[in-house]
Image (cartoon, grey):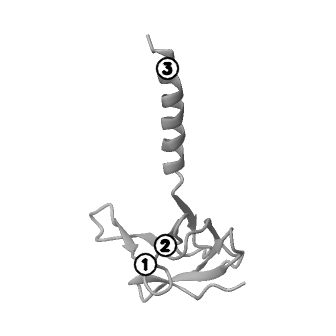
Amino acid sequence: MLHRSLLPVMVVLACVGSVRAENFMFAPAPHQELNRIFRVDRATGEMGACNYAIKDENSVGLTLCYPAGEGAKAGEAGDYALVPSNHRAEAGIYRVNRRTGDVSVCFVRGDQEVVCTPPAR
Protein backbone atom coordinates (compact mmCIF):
# COMPACT_ATOMS: atom_id res chain seq x y z
CA MET A 1 0.00 0.00 0.00
CA LEU A 2 1.24 3.50 -0.86
CA HIS A 3 2.09 5.75 2.07
CA ARG A 4 0.11 9.04 2.08
CA SER A 5 3.24 11.17 2.57
CA LEU A 6 4.54 9.98 -0.81
CA LEU A 7 1.47 11.16 -2.71
CA PRO A 8 2.53 14.87 -2.99
CA VAL A 9 5.98 13.79 -4.19
CA MET A 10 4.45 11.58 -6.86
CA VAL A 11 2.17 14.40 -8.05
CA VAL A 12 5.16 16.75 -8.40
CA LEU A 13 7.15 14.11 -10.31
CA ALA A 14 4.22 13.49 -12.64
CA CYS A 15 3.97 17.23 -13.37
CA VAL A 16 7.71 17.50 -14.02
CA GLY A 17 7.52 14.56 -16.42
CA SER A 18 4.67 16.16 -18.37
CA VAL A 19 6.55 19.48 -18.64
CA ARG A 20 9.58 17.69 -20.05
CA ALA A 21 7.37 16.01 -22.64
CA GLU A 22 6.54 19.43 -24.07
CA ASN A 23 10.10 20.71 -24.60
CA PHE A 24 9.68 20.57 -28.37
CA MET A 25 6.97 21.50 -30.84
CA PHE A 26 6.67 19.88 -34.26
CA ALA A 27 4.89 21.07 -37.40
CA PRO A 28 4.96 20.03 -41.05
CA ALA A 29 6.15 22.30 -43.82
CA PRO A 30 3.07 23.68 -45.62
CA HIS A 31 4.42 22.59 -49.05
CA GLN A 32 2.14 19.78 -50.22
CA GLU A 33 4.89 18.08 -52.22
CA LEU A 34 7.41 18.04 -49.35
CA ASN A 35 7.54 15.41 -46.63
CA ARG A 36 9.37 17.58 -44.10
CA ILE A 37 8.66 18.28 -40.45
CA PHE A 38 10.16 21.14 -38.45
CA ARG A 39 11.08 21.03 -34.75
CA VAL A 40 11.56 23.95 -32.34
CA ASP A 41 12.85 23.88 -28.79
CA ARG A 42 10.08 25.78 -27.03
CA ALA A 43 12.43 27.37 -24.49
CA THR A 44 15.45 28.33 -26.64
CA GLY A 45 14.03 28.62 -30.16
CA GLU A 46 16.61 26.22 -31.62
CA MET A 47 15.31 24.77 -34.88
CA GLY A 48 15.73 21.47 -36.67
CA ALA A 49 14.02 19.67 -39.52
CA CYS A 50 13.74 16.11 -40.79
CA ASN A 51 12.32 14.40 -43.84
CA TYR A 52 11.99 10.94 -45.31
CA ALA A 53 14.31 9.78 -48.08
CA ILE A 54 14.48 6.59 -50.12
CA LYS A 55 17.90 4.98 -49.89
CA ASP A 56 17.30 2.34 -52.53
CA GLU A 57 14.33 0.37 -53.79
CA ASN A 58 15.02 -2.54 -51.42
CA SER A 59 15.09 -0.55 -48.19
CA VAL A 60 12.47 1.08 -46.02
CA GLY A 61 14.29 4.38 -46.49
CA LEU A 62 15.77 6.66 -43.89
CA THR A 63 15.13 9.83 -41.95
CA LEU A 64 17.33 12.78 -42.91
CA CYS A 65 17.65 15.46 -40.24
CA TYR A 66 19.14 18.91 -40.63
CA PRO A 67 20.92 20.72 -37.78
CA ALA A 68 20.44 24.33 -36.74
CA GLY A 69 22.48 26.75 -38.82
CA GLU A 70 22.57 30.54 -39.18
CA GLY A 71 19.81 32.17 -37.12
CA ALA A 72 18.37 28.79 -36.11
CA LYS A 73 20.59 28.02 -33.12
CA ALA A 74 19.46 28.47 -29.52
CA GLY A 75 18.69 32.10 -28.73
CA GLU A 76 17.16 34.13 -25.96
CA ALA A 77 14.83 32.31 -23.59
CA GLY A 78 11.22 32.49 -24.66
CA ASP A 79 8.07 30.56 -25.44
CA TYR A 80 8.58 29.51 -29.05
CA ALA A 81 6.06 27.93 -31.39
CA LEU A 82 5.80 27.03 -35.07
CA VAL A 83 3.18 28.43 -37.45
CA PRO A 84 2.91 27.06 -41.00
CA SER A 85 1.65 29.47 -43.62
CA ASN A 86 -1.39 28.66 -45.75
CA HIS A 87 0.74 28.88 -48.89
CA ARG A 88 0.65 25.39 -50.40
CA ALA A 89 4.05 25.77 -52.09
CA GLU A 90 5.94 27.27 -49.12
CA ALA A 91 8.83 25.12 -47.88
CA GLY A 92 9.58 27.23 -44.79
CA ILE A 93 7.78 27.81 -41.52
CA TYR A 94 7.33 30.72 -39.13
CA ARG A 95 9.04 30.54 -35.72
CA VAL A 96 7.26 32.80 -33.24
CA ASN A 97 8.26 33.83 -29.73
CA ARG A 98 4.96 34.09 -27.91
CA ARG A 99 6.53 36.15 -25.09
CA THR A 100 8.04 38.90 -27.24
CA GLY A 101 6.01 38.73 -30.46
CA ASP A 102 9.16 38.19 -32.55
CA VAL A 103 8.70 36.30 -35.82
CA SER A 104 11.28 34.74 -38.13
CA VAL A 105 11.01 32.46 -41.14
CA CYS A 106 12.98 29.22 -41.10
CA PHE A 107 13.78 26.84 -43.94
CA VAL A 108 16.27 24.18 -45.00
CA ARG A 109 19.09 25.72 -47.03
CA GLY A 110 20.95 23.59 -49.53
CA ASP A 111 19.76 20.31 -47.98
CA GLN A 112 22.38 20.87 -45.27
CA GLU A 113 21.00 22.97 -42.42
CA VAL A 114 18.02 24.88 -41.07
CA VAL A 115 18.44 28.66 -41.26
CA CYS A 116 16.19 31.45 -40.02
CA THR A 117 15.77 35.11 -40.86
CA PRO A 118 16.52 37.63 -38.09
CA PRO A 119 13.55 38.05 -35.73
CA ALA A 120 11.23 40.99 -36.41
CA ARG A 121 7.96 42.41 -35.08
**Which numbered tag is attached to residue 7?**
none
Marks 2 and 3, Cα distance to the nearest angstrom? 40 Å
Q: Which mark, residue 5?
A: 3
Q: Which element is circle 3 on?
A: helix
In the image shown, does 35 or 112 lie closer to the viewer? 112
* Cβ atoms at labels 2 and 3 below 8 Å apart: no
> Quick one: which residue is furthest to the front in this view?
5
- Picture coordinates of residue 105 (x, y %)? 61, 82
> Which part of the image, by quadrant, shows the N terminus?
top left
Q: Give residue 21's position: percent from left, percent from top.
A: 50, 49
The image's mark for residue 46 is 2
Q: Position of residue 56 (x, y in %)?
A: 28, 71
Label 1, label 3: how far apart the Cα atoms are? 45 Å
User: Around disc 1, counting alpha carbons within 10 Å, would you say few (fewer than 14), some (14 to 19), or many (20 or more)?
Assistant: many
**Quadrant of the image occupied by residue 15:** top right
- Tag 2–tag 1 contact (CB < 8 Å): yes
Three-letter amino acid code of the residue under disc 3: Ser
In the picture, measured across the screen, residue 57 lies left or right of residue 95, that is left
Q: Which mark is residue 68?
A: 1
Q: Where is the C terminus found, in terms of image quarters?
A: bottom right
Tag in front: 2 or 3 = 3
Residue 30 position by quadrant: bottom right
> For the residue marked with disc 1, what is the amino acid?
Ala
Q: Amino acid at mark 2?
A: Glu
The reply to whether residue 28 is visible in this rendering is yes
Nearer-N-terminus badge (1/3): 3
Q: Residue at x 43, y 83 (%)?
A: 69
Q: In the rendered image, is residue 90 in sight?
A: no
Foreground mark, 1 or 3, reads 3
In depth, the one of 75 and 90 nearer the eye is 75
Task: Give SS at disc 2.
Answer: loop
